[in-house]
Amino acid sequence: MRIKFFYQLLVSQISILVLAFLILSLSFSQFVENYIFQNKVEELNDYGEQILTDLTVRLEGTESFLEEYSQILDTRHIQYILFNYEGKVIYPQLQSAPLIQLTKSEWEKISSGSSVSVKHDIKRFGQEVTLVAMPFMQGDKLAGGILLLSPITGAMDMIRQLNRFLLYTIVISLSASILISLIFSKSLIKRIRNIRNATSMITAGNYDVHVPDTYQDEIGQLATDFNKMAEKLNESNEEIERLENRRRKFIADVSHEMRTPLTTISGLAEGIKDHLIPEDGIEKGMILIDREAKRLIRLVNENLDYEKIRSNQLKLNKIEMELTEVLEVVEEQLHLQASEKNNQLVVQCDEEITVFADYDRLIQIIVNIVKNAIQFTENGQIMLKGKEEGSAIIIEIEDTGVGIDPLEIESIWLRFYKADLSRTNQAYGEFGIGLSIVKQLVQLHDGEIEVSSEKGEGTTFTIRLPKKEKEQ
């Protein structure tokens, strides 16, 4: 059977209160009752001892003496009876001198010289009484004794009235406790319900939730932690959506980039197979197939590099090398490509300048930038400069090409971004992924890269790499 937490909480609180009140009431009632009866027993003991002492001292005028005590004790609603060693009543004088009403165990106790006290007796004397029986010993033998009785009807009435007051107190306190518990329980349940509703919203995919956390108790701390969790989930969800969008875009871009060379290769291969291309055009077709295949290889390699960098799997092997040598190697690799567009590659760098970097990756960085410069420059000049500036080595690649629109400068670092869609059919840098790799490779070297450009005035890429720290 399902029981709501609200009722569980309410019942548990009320049960604790009821149990506490019952224990307190019973304990208090028992304490008062014992206190009253104990005082009554002590009072009877005092009178009994006093009577027995006076009886021992006074041997004459006993009858008048006992009458005086009877009058005194009557004012206290106390009755006393003297009995002999056989248990027969000797005062007050009664017909047939009946035996006193003591149980066997009580009589054995009296016979051994011990007093007997009963705080509450309701059977033997026709009313509720407290009784005390005290022996009178002569040596080791019982000579007689005294029995004192005190009705406790008034005391019992007082105890019953006290119990009624306690009951009223319990009922009133319990009612107030139930009301207060109800108010606090509803407030608590409301806060729990808020967290539950927010959890349901998160389950449904809505992470933009906030639970009130103004209270500083445990549930308030839970609400605070819940809000932090919701914020993290919202951020993670946004990041997942961004990654999913990037994945879709990546698949679309790669599919688009691969479609053209694959279509070209497939068409030329079928043409050659079906003898649709004349003999003098086969060699040209094979060259075109080779070029398109290399485009696909470059696309695959660039994507592999990009994923290695993104997943921190790319390790650098840094060495100290002459910067002039690196720039001259790049100039030699790209000299023919630059010549095809009537561009001139110029290296300007002091031979003493060294750079601390991964040789292959530094070549890759500069080659990508220079290829980009060659593509957008015709009949111009591309400068490869190197210099020292404080604690950094500066590498600049400056061209006199068409330049980049200032609004597009930040976008050139994005994967597959193309400033000019006509680049698709170009031979170099056509995939729009190179500059994204360049920036991440520079950052892996703890360096920085900047670009400045004006439309029609050319573009300058500036790479700043830290010098190797001197050993202490």
Image (cartoon, grey):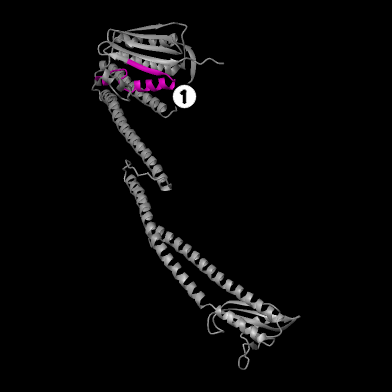
Which residue, given by chain and number where applicable, does mark 1 sit on?
A: 315
Q: Nearer the viewer, residue 152 or 51?
A: 51
Which residue is located at x 55 percent, y 71 percent? 36
Q: Where is residue 448? Give x, y as percent.
A: 40, 18
Q: Which of 374 and 396 is in front in this view?
A: 396
Q: How many marks?
A: 1
Residue 285 percent across, percent down from the top left: 28, 19
Q: Which of 36 and 355 is in front in this view?
A: 36
Residue at (29, 14) in percent of width and height: 453
The x and y percentages for residue 129 are 55, 79
Q: What residue type is labelled 1?
A: Lys
**Residue 157 appears in the picture as rendered:** yes
Asked whether, in this view, residue 341 is left or right of residue 96, the answer is left
Which of 14 and 422 lies nearest the eye of the viewer? 14
Q: Vertically, is 454 above or below 158?
A: above
Which residues, given as a range, are shown in magenta? 422-451
**201 sits to left or right of 128:** left
